[in-house]
Amino acid sequence: MKIRPRFLSLLFVIILAISFTSCEEDDLDGMFGDPVENFLGTWNCFETGDIFGDFGPFTVQIIRNPDNSSEVLIKNFNYQGMDVSARAIIAGNTITIPRQGICDDTIEIKGSGAFGRGEISLTYTTDDGADLENITARFYK
């Protein structure tokens, strides 16, 4: 029995195609589940600001906003107390904190970040009228 070169080439291509794998883990839950679920829960937070430096860890809690299904609330945002919440919008693995006032509108905040590898990374600004601080934060469990 003689095997044709064209058949061997086709067989090689099929075997090669089957053997390809991705270096990244496939996230089927992220593709089909609710992306907000990744962000919900109680987190440890560590912040680094360009004025006040490192701070943390402290606890924050992320819950769904009962008044707006497209938002979450970050309680104890910027270590302002569990009764202070920042609103944020989740789209896929990204989180956006729109410009808003917290602490009875005495501090203006805005920022964005992402969920990845079981953590949330954020960059945001706080402006209390005296200091404008750029902060990076890491939420981890």
Image (spheres, grey):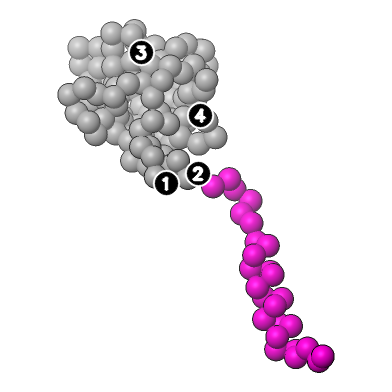
Q: Earlier in the sequence, mark 2 or mark 4?
A: 2
| Residue picked out by circle 2 | 27
Residue 100 lies, in percent from the top left, at 23, 25
Instruction: Tell me how far mark 1 sits from mark 2, CA to CA.
Output: 6 Å
Q: Which residues are magenta?
A: 1-27
Residue 78 in view (yes/no): no
Type of amino acid under label 1: Met
Q: Residue furthest front?
A: 1
Q: Nearer the viewer, mark 1 or mark 3?
A: 1
Q: Earlier in the sequence, mark 2 or mark 3?
A: 2
Element type at marker 1? helix
The circle on residue 119 is: 4
Instruction: Tell me how far mark 3 sits from mark 4, CA to CA.
Output: 17 Å
Residue at the (64%, 68%) spot, across then down: 17
Q: Nearer the viewer, mark 4 or mark 1?
A: 1
Residue at the (70%, 85%) spot, across then down: 7
Q: Is residue 10 magenta?
A: yes
Type of amino acid under label 3: Asn
Q: Earlier in the sequence, mark 1 or mark 3?
A: 1
**Pointer 3 with pointer 4, Cβ within 8 A:** no
Q: Residue furthest right?
A: 1
Q: Earlier in the sequence, mark 3 or mark 4?
A: 3
Instruction: Tell me how far mark 2 sits from mark 4, CA to CA.
Output: 15 Å
Along the line of sight, which residue is nearer the eye, 134 or 84?
Answer: 84
The circle on residue 116 is: none
Q: Is residue 120 magenta?
A: no
Instruction: Tell me how far mark 1 sits from mark 3, CA to CA.
Output: 30 Å
Q: Nearer the viewer, mark 3 or mark 4?
A: 4
**Pointer 2 with pointer 4, Cβ within 8 A:** no
